[in-house]
Amino acid sequence: MRNTEIKFEIVETIGVIGTSPNGWTKELNIVAWNGYPAKYDLRQWSPDRSKFGKGFTFTAEEAEELFELLEERLIEDGRKANESDALKSLLMDNYFNESEDDEDEGEE
């Protein structure tokens, strides 16, 4: 069995969804895993963030689709959906379009 170290960088903490009695938190973050480009990441983390559980990663497009599906379901269930476009704006932020920013900087 290969013993490979998993490297990660939490680029941005978006928010904590819940906390278990043992202190682990379920979080939505932007994380770069093993040197790959950062993605939206939903998983549980130990209090010191040295350990983590299985989770899900999403590209900006996948996160936007997930948001839309959840929004539709919340409305169908009669729950008031947050009508703010802040999350949608965050999902399509230029965070994942760094190459476009680099091109703009080169035009000066």
Image: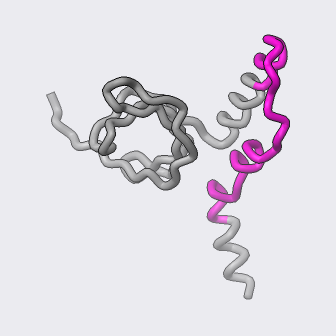
Tally of numbered discs: 0
Left or right of 37 on screen, residue 21: left
Outermost residue toward the top? 77
Quadrant for the C terminus in the image: bottom right
**Depth check, front residue: 25 or 52:** 25
Q: Is residue 55 above or below residue 88?
A: above
User: From the viewer's perspective, is 54 left or right of 83?
Assistant: left
> What residue lies at 63% left-to-right and 57% top-to-bottom?
95
Provide the residue span drawn in magenta. 71-99
Q: Position of residue 14 (x, y in %)?
A: 57, 46
Q: Nearer the viewer, residue 101 or 75?
A: 75
Tell me residue 85's x, y (percent). 82, 44
Q: Quadrant of residue 72?
A: top right
- Left or right of residue 100: residue 12: left
Q: How is the image coloured?
A: one colour
On screen, residue 84 above or below 44? below
Q: Residue at x 36, y 31 (%)?
A: 24
Q: Position of residue 60 (x, y in %)?
A: 66, 43
- Location of residue 40 with respect to 1 vertically, above or below: below
Q: Was residue 19 drawn as part of the magenta stretch in this picture?
A: no
Residue 99 appears left or right of 50: right
Whether the magenta-drawn stretch holds residue 79 is answered as yes
Image quarter where the N terminus lies is: top left
Residue drawn at the location 28% of the way across and 43% of the way down: 50
In depth, the one of 34 and 66 nearer the eye is 66
Task: Name the residue furthest bottom.
Answer: 108
Reply above or below: 52 against 106.
Answer: above
The residue depicted at 40 percent of the width and 25 percent of the height is: 20
